[in-house]
């Protein structure tokens, strides 16, 4: 009997699926039987901000409609590190499945599905060198041979309006789309990964297919005009009430007391926990050390997390944990330079690490053998539990450079967008002279002086609003009063401020010794965000601020 290929399977046979069929980190869904899924979004959370002309707030109940049902062909979900972009993308994909199966109690034919193909791709795993076919770009890892990839791609070209493609983590790509655009290609041309992605976003390829992407904001703003999404949704964080509920739930005993201490002793942290990943990390710290003051910066937060991890009794290789972390710093830095957030077993060997040594510090998934999803087959790829942890470790490597290398790296790279979060951590480590067992910083005073000069120069010369917001965050992270007093003008106009960013803006304005202007025009500011800014300014004699001052 002739073997039935996957191409034929997709063409005429649809497997009954209950729930979501997941192929580890890359996902492709075909559906036959209706399995209505409950909406898992909590409408009352309302932590999304849609960044359009009117900069209005929208709730989670509108996200699915915005991403899937509206006429716009491309929607971007943007946010800072740890805000939950990947989690939200997966939720949208899952709800898209439910939306595709809606409207009738029984489905006689797949032709009744709203979407027949829902493809979810994590870009951090798309590490391609040289030229490849668009079919391989879109369906790599799902099939055992090239013929099946080609058939799936042919089907997509023929049924573009019946498909949704999710690209998660555009900022994590090892390749970069050129700011001034790229060449147009035909559907079957081989090209570099960046060129294929450019053609998809510019609608030269798959013009009728709905596209949803996620990224940190700088990567979207850096796209060529013709490739920028028409609709952008910015995650502004959990509401304060929901953040508190989740925090107290995680802490369990004495959760209310711990929350009160955070609000009193670390106002920045109270706003930072609106970002999910930092909510969890803060809960871990407060549960482990309930009597210690909460950390006041993200740098101190990660230092405490690493310290807790190093002291866990049942952690493997506890005696060598310091050496392992130092090696991970070098690997994290090398990954940042190469634009990578995933690492192979060979990367571990180059760094002098064994996969057994990083089991408690990194995540691992099957490498190229994603189709079978069998962990015992093929090689593995490794990644840090969150990209911001990689950036923190990379910053640790930077601050421990020799003075000459530190100055050279700072001049050539640290001001670039890819390194913006690393720069925050570098400032948090360099300017903080509190004894720290995690970092051995030589020539601290000279490095501090050089970094201060670099920041002052950027304050004067770079007017890009997103760059300046990152710079404000780095200055705040430093905790250096002299550096904060150098700020004469704060311009956050046109930026959808999160709770944490609002606290940073207000705090810097209050601590500046030479403030001439605070511009927040065309920002989507509600009463709560406004209260955070004015609350930080309460000790400063300024004109009264109200909603009427902002567009």
Image: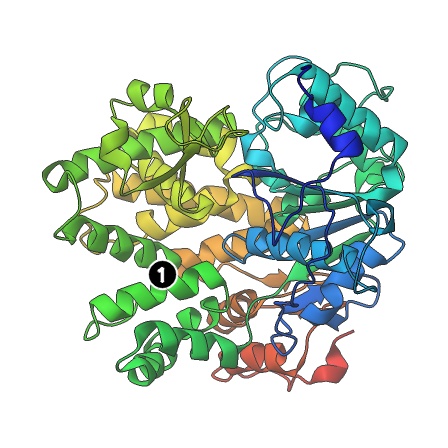
Q: Nearer the viewer, residue 10 or 458?
A: 10
Residue on which the image places disc 1: 281
| Residue 110 in sight | yes
Residue located 35% across and 65% down the image: 282
| Residue 180 in sight | no
Secondary structure under tag 1 reads helix
Residue 544 against residue 210 in the figure, above or below: below
The answer to whether residue 218 is left or right of residue 199 is left
Residue 93 against residue 148 in the figure, above or below: below
Q: Quadrant of residue 245?
A: bottom left
The answer to whether residue 350 is left or right of residue 382 is left
The answer to whether residue 248 is left or right of residue 523 is left
- At which x and y percent is residue 442? 22, 37
Residue located 87% across and 46% down the image: 111
Residue located 51% across and 77% down the image: 242
Q: Residues within 10 Å of mark 1 (few under 14, many from 20)?
A: some
- At which x and y percent is residue 97? 71, 54
- At which x and y percent is residue 156? 82, 32
């Amino acid at each position: 009997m002739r073997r039935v290929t996957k191409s034929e399977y997709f063409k005429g046979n649809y497997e009954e699926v209950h729930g979501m069929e997941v192929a580890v980190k890359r996902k492709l869904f075909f559906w036959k039987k209706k399995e209505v899924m409950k909406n898992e979004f909590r409408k009352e959370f309302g932590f999304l901000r849609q960044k359009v002309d009117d900069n209005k707030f929208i709730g989670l109940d509108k996200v699915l409609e915005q991403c899937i049902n509206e006429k716009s062909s491309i929607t971007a979900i943007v946010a800072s590190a740890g805000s939950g972009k990947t989690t939200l993308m997966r939720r949208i994909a899952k709800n898209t499945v439910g939306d595709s199966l809606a409207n009738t109690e029984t489905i006689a034919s797949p032709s009744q599905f709203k979407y027949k193909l829902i493809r979810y791709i994590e870009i951090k795993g798309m590490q391609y060198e040289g030229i490849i076919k668009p079919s391989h770009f879109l369906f790599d890892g799902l099939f055992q041979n090239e013929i099946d990839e080609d058939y799936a791609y042919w089907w997509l070209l023929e049924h573009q309006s019946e498909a949704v493609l999710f690209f998660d983590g555009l900022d994590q790509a090892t390749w970069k789309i050129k700011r001034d655009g790229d060449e147009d290609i035909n559907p079957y041309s081989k090209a570099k990964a960046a060129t294929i992605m450019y053609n998809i976003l510019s609608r030269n390829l798959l013009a009728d297919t709905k596209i949803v992407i996620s990224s940190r904001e700088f990567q979207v703003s850096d796209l060529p005009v013709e490739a920028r999404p028409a609709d952008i949704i910015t995650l502004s964080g959990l509401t304060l009430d929901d953040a508190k509920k989740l925090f107290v739930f995680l802490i369990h005993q004495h959760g209310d007391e711990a929350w009160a201490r955070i609000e009193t002793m670390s106002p920045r942290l109270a706003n930072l926990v609106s970002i999910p990943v930092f909510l969890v990390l803060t809960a871990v710290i407060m549960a482990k050390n309930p009597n210690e003051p909460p950390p006041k910066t993200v740098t101190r937060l990660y230092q405490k997390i690493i310290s807790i991890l190093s002291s866990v009794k049942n952690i493997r290789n506890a005696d060598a944990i310091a050496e392992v972390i130092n090696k991970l710093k070098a690997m994290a830095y090398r990954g940042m330079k190469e634009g990578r957030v995933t690492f192979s077993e060979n990367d571990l060997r180059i760094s002098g690490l064994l996969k057994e040594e990083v089991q408690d510090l990194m995540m691992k998934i099957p490498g190229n053998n994603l189709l079978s999803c069998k962990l015992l087959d093929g090689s593995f790829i490794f990644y840090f539990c969150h990209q911001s942890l990689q950036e923190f470790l990379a910053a640790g490597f930077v601050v421990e450079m020799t003075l000459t290398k530190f100055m050279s790296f700072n001049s050539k790279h640290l001001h670039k967008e890819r390194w913006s979060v690393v720069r925050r951590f570098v400032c948090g480590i360099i300017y903080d002279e509190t004894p720290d067992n995690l970092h051995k910083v030589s020539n601290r005073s000279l490095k501090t002086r050089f970094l201060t000069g670099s920041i002052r120069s950027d304050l004067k010369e770079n007017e890009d609003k997103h760059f300046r917001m990152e710079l404000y965050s780095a200055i705040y992270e430093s905790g250096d009063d002299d550096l904060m007093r150098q700020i004469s003008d704060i311009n956050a106009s046109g930026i959808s401020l999160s709770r944490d960013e609002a606290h940073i803006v207000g705090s810097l304005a209050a601590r500046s010794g030479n403030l001439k202007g605070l511009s927040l025009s065309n920002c989507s500011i509600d009463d709560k965000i406004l209260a955070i800014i004015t609350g930080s300014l309460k000790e400063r004699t300024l004109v009264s601020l109200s909603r009427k001052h902002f567009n």
